Image: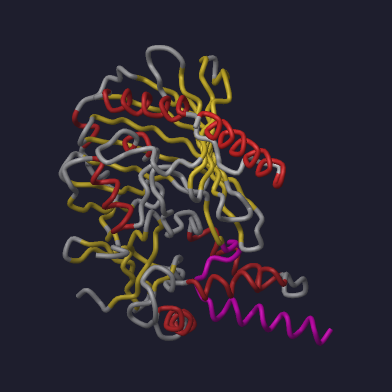
Amino acid sequence: MARTFRASVSIALAVLLCGAVAAPVHADRNKARTSVNRSKSVKVDSNRRTNVDVDRNRNINVDRDRNVDIDVDRDRDIDIDVDRHGCCYYGSGWGTAAAVATTAAVTRAVVGTRVYTLPPNCRIVVANGFTYQQCGTVYYQPQFVGTTTSYVVVNSPY
Amino acid sequence: MKRSSTLQTALAIGLTLVAVTANGQPSAPAVDPAATKAIEGMSTYLRSLKTFSVEAATATDDVLDDGQVSTNTAKTVFVVQMPSKLFAETSSDRQSRSYVYDGKTFTLYARRAGYYATVPAPATLRELADVLSDKYGIELPLTDLFLWGAPGWGTGEITAAVDLGPAEVAGTTCQHYAFRQPGVDWQIWIQKGDFPLPRRLVITTTDDEAKPRHIVNYTWNLAPSVNDAAFTFTPPSDAHKIVLAAISQ
């Protein structure tokens, strides 16, 4: 019982802290090479996350309705996802910043944070010919990293 | 003199036999020159094509953190006008992406998300493949089709090559070859006769113990009806322009 409760809190916390993190996505460690004429493989993974809305809704429901039935793997996956956010594509220094910043996304968005899903209730705005997602008072700039869609917290473009 | 040379040969054979029996495999991997020649022939033929279209069914393994493999299937439509025009579209359950290149700019378009990004591009597909891979972390679909036989290309990395005999792919008689090189084992089925096209490619990544595979089955059209508009991206009215992030400069 106590264990279940603690696990519930941990899951709830994880979901809270992660905010918009897509839920049941497994972390990939590798991907089959797709060319025999390149000695190295491209490290950016293009397939880890996809549709924003579906994942987010499922995540929220899981948190609310299924606290009793804890899936340890899911907790682990969420952590892995957080750890990986923004960390892996730009070399050193991003890992910690991303973890902290993702945590703060709910309460205080940190400019430069990269996430892969958006919080609820965003609207598209266009400034200077580029597209932004305005979510409350926070602006996200959508970017392709490899072929994956991601969102970087930016200052207001206005 | 003759005698000593015979002795040397006998010694060499003897040593080879020892090497073979010691680990159950030949000590030196065999590169069958006929197999590398087949790849060269196919590559030369590919580079002689000016306009072609390919439909490819692919299956690509992702390795999950615990080593389990997840296979993602996709379909790619691919229209090329060498050396500087490309339209490619891949769609899978997870992603739909278009790649449009007119020799001056490159556009990546995510149809379901409604996002596109356009960047300046080099003058040839060969160079584009490098820029996209090195600067943006994007591997063009079916990229080997314009890397085989390109300037600077060679079979030098191949450490083992074997001819596995005739085999049929989707009703076409092919010759089946297998190769090894650092990081990958790969097999290819090359159409027999005057049009030595690749009909199937299987790449096994060997430096991950899960051995993930990438499998491609190609369907060729060597006389597609193409007009230039196909290689120019016109954003749909509901599409939004976004940034293509550089992973290095």
Principal SS element in the magenta part? helix
B49 versus B137 height, above or below? above
Query: Is A6 covered by the magenta stretch?
Result: yes
Q: Nearer the viewer, residue B176 or B247?
A: B176
Left or right? Give the position of A112 relative to B106: right
Residue A69, x across and y down, in percent: 77, 71
Q: Magenta part of the protein: which range?
A: A1-27
The image quarter in which residue B36 lies: top left
Residue at 31%, 39% (x, y): give it.
B153
Q: Nearer the viewer, residue B81 or B40?
A: B40
Residue B144, x across and y down, in percent: 38, 38
Q: Nearer the viewer, residue B47 or A4?
A: B47
Q: How many marks do you count on the picture? A: 0
Coloration mode = secondary structure
Residue at 38%, 12% (x, y): give it.
B194
Residue at 66%, 69% (x, y): give it.
A74
Query: Is A7 covered by the magenta stretch?
Result: yes
Q: Residue furthest right?
A: A1
Left or right? Give the position of B40 relative to B69: left
Residue B56, x across and y down, in percent: 45, 31
